[in-house]
Image: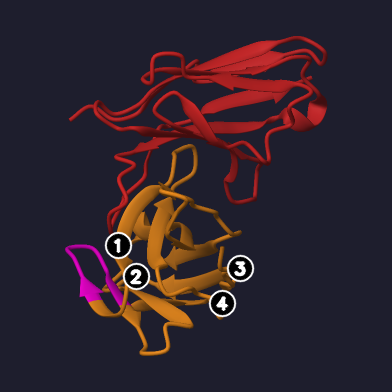
C-alpha cells in the first residue's frame, strides 16, 4: 500500500515570496490533515479536511495560509507571503476518517521549508 | 481535548526495557490513547493504541490503569534504532471526525 506522498521535499524561499506544497493521501482515506512542525516542537494541526470539506482550520493563519482539497483526494497548502517564522516542516497526513475505534493517522515524510 | 503531559527526555542503555508515562487527567469517556514515534527528518509513525487495560503488539505494550488518567508505553529491549521522539495523544471522534493534537513528546536517547 502506497503511503502519503508529499512534494517538494525541500524548499528555500525568501521572505514575502510564496510557496505551495502538494499532498496525495492514501487511497480511500477521507480525512486529510496538514500539520506544521517547528524544530523541537510537536506537530501543530493547521487544517483538517473530511473529503473536500474543512472540519477544522482554527489554527490556520488565514491571512497568509490557504489550503484546498478540491476533489476530495489531493490537497495543496499555500503560503503567501511567507515570513521567517514559517520555517518549519509541513506534514500531510490521512486517515480513513470513519467514526470507529483505532482510527490510525498516517503521515507523509514532510516538506521542509526554509524562509530566508 | 484532553491535554497530555510527558517527560521531555529519557536516556536508556541498549537492551533495557523503557517505560514512558503520559498523564492525561482530563481524558473523556470516548477518548482513545495513541502513541506515535518520530525519527529525525520523518513524519510520525503509529506505534500502538488502546482504550483500557493492556494492549500489546509486535513493537510495544501499552498499559492503561482503570481510571485512565495516565498510560505507559513500554518498549522491550530497546536498541539504538529506537532513539526517537515519542508522542502520547488522547482524542476521539468529535463532531463525527477524529481530532488529534500533539504535545511536545518525549525524546528517548538509547545509549550503547
Number of the front mark, 4 or 2: 4
SS of the residue at dot 2?
loop
* Real-space CA distance between mark 1 and mark 3, rounded to the nearest whole angstrom: 20 Å
Chain appearing in orange on the rendered image: B
The residue that disc 1 covers is B48
Where does label 4 land, which residue?
B26
Q: Are marks 3 and 2 on the same chain?
A: yes
Residue topped by disc 3? B8
The residue at which mark 2 appears reads as B14
Percent from the top left, x then y, of residue A87?
71, 29
Instruction: Work out whether residue B104 or residue A80 is closer to the camera in this orientation and state it.
Output: A80
Camera-side mark, 3 or 2: 3
Q: Secondary structure at mark 4?
A: loop
Residue B30 found in image quarter = bottom left
Kindly report the distance in space between the C-alpha atoms of the residues bearing marks 2 and 1.
21 Å
The answer to whether dots 4 and 2 both sit on one chain is: yes
Of helix, strand and loop, which one carries label 1?
strand
Amino acid at each position: 500500500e502506497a503511503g502519503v506522498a508529499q512534494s517538494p521535499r525541500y524548499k528555500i524561499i525568501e521572505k514575502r515570496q510564496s510557496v505551495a506544497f502538494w499532498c496525495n493521501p492514501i487511497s480511500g482515506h477521507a480525512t486529510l490533515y496538514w500539520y506544521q512542525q517547528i524544530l523541537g516542537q510537536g506537530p501543530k494541526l493547521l487544517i483538517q479536511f473530511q473529503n473536500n470539506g474543512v472540519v477544522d482550520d482554527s489554527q490556520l493563519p488565514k491571512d497568509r495560509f490557504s489550503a484546498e482539497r478540491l476533489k476530495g483526494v489531493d490537497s495543496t497548502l499555500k503560503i503567501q507571503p511567507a515570513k521567517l517564522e514559517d520555517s518549519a516542516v509541513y506534514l500531510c497526513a490521512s486517515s480513513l476518517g470513519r467514526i470507529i475505534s483505532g482510527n490510525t493517522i498516517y503521515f507523509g515524510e514532510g516538506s521542509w521549508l526554509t524562509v530566508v | 481535548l484532553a491535554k497530555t503531559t510527558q517527560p521531555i527526555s529519557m536516556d536508556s542503555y541498549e537492551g533495557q526495557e523503557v517505560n514512558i508515562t503520559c498523564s492525561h487527567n482530563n481524558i473523556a469517556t470516548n477518548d482513545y490513547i495513541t502513541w506515535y514515534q518520530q525519527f529525525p527528518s520523518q513524519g510520525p509513525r503509529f506505534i500502538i493504541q488502546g482504550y483500557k487495560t493492556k494492549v500489546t503488539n509486535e513493537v510495544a505494550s501499552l498499559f492503561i490503569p482503570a481510571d485512565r488518567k495516565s498510560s505507559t508505553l513500554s518498549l522491550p529491549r530497546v536498541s539504538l534504532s529506537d532513539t526517537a521522539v515519542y508522542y502520547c495523544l488522547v482524542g476521539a471522534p468529535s463532531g463525527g471526525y477524529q481530532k488529534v493534537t500533539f504535545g511536545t513528546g518525549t525524546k528517548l536517547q538509547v545509549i550503547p
